[in-house]
Amino acid sequence: MVADKVATDYLFRDGEYITIEQAKTVLINRNDLSDNERCYRYLQDKIAMNNQRFDMDTKVEKWGTLEKGVAIIYNQAFKELCKSGGFSDKAFLSWADRKGLIETQGGRMTKVKKVDGNPIRCVFLRLNDNIDKDGFEPVETMDKYEQEELPFK
């Protein structure tokens, strides 16, 4: 709330403070979000932030490909992504399978994808349909907090 006071008093000078109750409606308690849900959001963010790693035309290390709302991630890249975020890849895959967020094959958490004619095991992760091409998810507006006019002109 200190940042709100600084922004309101010194930056915008609009007198529009955010109350604790207003902030609580936007914030998510870490305890309310499981490690696996956080991992899913982390993976979505990493995919959105690193679109070039899924584009076969750019000259960078590839993590996989994107097809019809599904991130097809090379198995090793998936393990490294989970590790870099501090998440368990096996726990996440088990959770994601129960939630229907991954496509499986023959009882395995991965599927075979042909890459340059070679079969490679990949994680087929369904992406959130609400996320746009830039990785942003629309948020429902709250009319009573919506500002109709900018405080500065």
Image: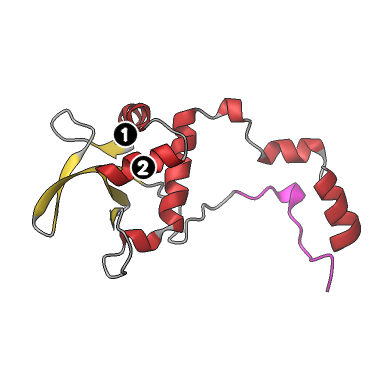
Q: Is residue 126 visible?
A: yes
Q: How many marks?
A: 2
Give the labeled residue for mark 1.
100
Residue 31 horizontal/vertical position (percent): 59, 25
Q: Earlier in the sequence, mark 2 or mark 1?
A: 2
Picture quarter with the N terminus: top right
Q: Residues within 10 Å of mark 2 (few under 14, many from 20)?
A: some
Q: Is residue 150 magenta?
A: yes
Q: Is residue 14 visible?
A: no
Task: Give, as a three-letter code, the residue at label 1.
Answer: Gly
Q: In front: 98, or 46?
A: 46
Q: Is residue 38 above or below residue 131?
A: above
Main SS, magenta residues: loop
Residue farthest to the bottom? 153
Q: In front: 98, or 139?
A: 98
Residue visible at 40% across and 52% down in the picture = 47
> Mark 2 falls on what kind of element?
helix
In the figure, is residue 94 to the left or right of 26?
left
Residue visible at 47% across and 50% down in the picture = 45
Residue visible at 84% across and 44% down in the picture = 2
Query: In the image, which is nearer the foreground, mark 2 or mark 1?
Result: 2
Give the labeled residue for mark 2.
80
Task: Give, as a three-letter code, the residue at label 2.
Answer: Glu
Residue 61 horizontal/vertical position (percent): 31, 59
Q: Residues within 10 Å of mark 1 (few under 14, many from 20)?
A: few
Using the rendered view, name the quadrant where residue 75 is placed: top left
In the figure, is residue 129 to the left or right of 15?
left
> Mark 1 falls on what kind of element?
loop
In the figure, is residue 120 to the left or right of 73?
left
Q: Is residue 62 above or below residue 35?
A: below
Q: Which residues are magenta?
A: 140-153
